[in-house]
Amino acid sequence: MEREEGRIINLMEPGHTGCAGCGQAIGARLVAKAAGPRVIIANATGCLEVYTTTYPRSSWEVPWIHSLFENAAAVAAGMEVTLKAMGRYGDVKIIAQAGDGGTADIGMGCISGMFERGHDILYICYDNEGYMNTGYQRSSLTPPGARTTTSPPGRNSWGNVTRKKNMPLIAVAHGVPYVATATPAEPRDLMRKVRKALEIEGPKYLHLLVPCVPGWGIESELSVEMARLATETFLFPVFEIENGVITRVRRVKERRPVEDYLRPQRRFAHLFRPGGEPVLEELRQIAEENSRLEPGPAVLFGA
Ligand SMILES: Cc1ncc(C[n+]2csc(CCOP(=O)(O)OP(=O)(O)O)c2C)c(N)n1
């Protein structure tokens, strides 16, 4: 247990079995640090669960429960109502966390229910853009053109064909009062958003882009740099939405071409071969759309 003047300073301990440079591990450690010791975490099946709780060890210095792949939000909702029934509501905060598969695919029903019922829970999606724990399959958050084991480029394909599902906007459409995105490349921003979210009553949604060293095919020392480039190319916009209004958008001083982000990643290598240009153009188009994000209403109509 790492301590500084008697205080535990690292609530997600090192010594776990995550890959060197894992963006998710860096993100989770920052989340735990920002949240502090008075939290309970429900963690869906996925990489983060597997490498932080390899039997008989655990990296977590806070109460932590492993849920199924699909139901971290429902388990967290159960904890919230139990604390209420025990008269201990407010003593601790509750976090539910999962990968992009556990969030945007299989977990969607439970998350929607948790949002709609208005539970006082911070939900965190660690988006590494694929089902990394089971061998790099695509998810609905895999970007266009990416090679995964279930979207292999070949004679008839240029990798994944779909765009990323817009999870932040789906949360906003549920009336979630605080929705934000962040990356481990800006730790202070990420931690501020965790603290701010935990102060707000009701459901909160935080979407973190977390580079995956083997799944993206990058050098381990590049994972934080990839997160930075994702925002500087506008392929991953960083923003906050409060009560349906975009209140902050991260400005980019020097916009980078999408190629700067794509080239170092082996999952995009085929796009630089003859014929890959239309997919590159689509990615440029997505970046262009994201670059136009401005403070103001996130949705223009609602129930
Ligand atoms: C109902 C069910 N289906 C499939 C699995 C197998 N499974 C475990 S983790 C996982 C992928 C996790 O992907 P993601 O949520 O994106 O997290 P990551 O490992 O990428 O962090 C799958 C398919 C399971 N545990 N339960």
Image (tube, grey):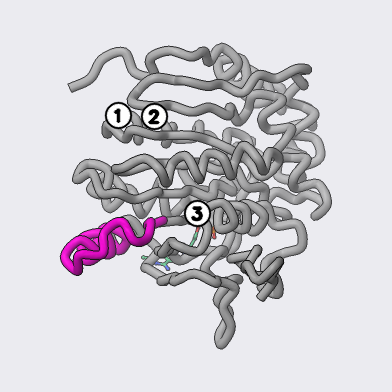
For the point 48% across and 34% down, the residue is 180
Alpha carbon separation for disc pair 3 and 1:
21 Å
Q: Disc 2 to disc 3, how far (Cα)?
A: 17 Å
Task: Residue 42: give x, y in percent of width and height.
Answer: 40, 64
Picture quadrant of residue 227: top right
x then y, percent, for residue 199: 40, 43
Q: Secondary structure at mark 2?
A: helix
Identity of the amino acid at label 2? Leu
Residue sitting at x 48%, y 14%: 295
At 40% from the left and 56% from the top, the residue drawn is 96
Q: Which residue is mark 1?
A: 173
On the rendered structure, is 49 left or right of 218? left
Crowding at mark 3 (Cα within 10 Å: few <14, some 14-19, many 20+):
many
* Quarter where residue 20 is shown: bottom right
Separation of disc 1 and disc 2 at Cα?
A: 6 Å
Q: Mark 1 and 2 residues: CB-CB less than 8 Å, in contact? A: yes
Q: Position of residue 172 (x, y in %)?
A: 34, 30
Q: Quadrant of the N terminus?
A: bottom right
Q: Inspect the image, locate mark 3, and give the three-letter code of the amino acid beneath it.
A: Gly
The label shown at residue 99 is 3
- Find the magenta span and give its range: 75-95
> Where 181 falls versus 77 (above or below)?
above
**Residue beneath disc 2:** 169
Does the closest atom of ligand 1 sit within 8 Å of the Cβ of label 3? yes
- Is the residue under label 1 in contact with that under label 3 (CB below 8 Å)? no
Q: Amino acid at mark 1?
A: Ala
Q: Position of residue 3 (x, y in %)?
A: 69, 70
For the residue carrying disc 2, how many other residues have a C-alpha within 10 Å: few (<14), some (14-19), or many (20+)?
some
Task: Check whether the beta carbons of the residues at disc 2 and disc 3 lie within 8 A of each other.
Answer: no
Q: Quadrant of residue 7?
A: bottom right
- Secondary structure beneath disc 3? strand
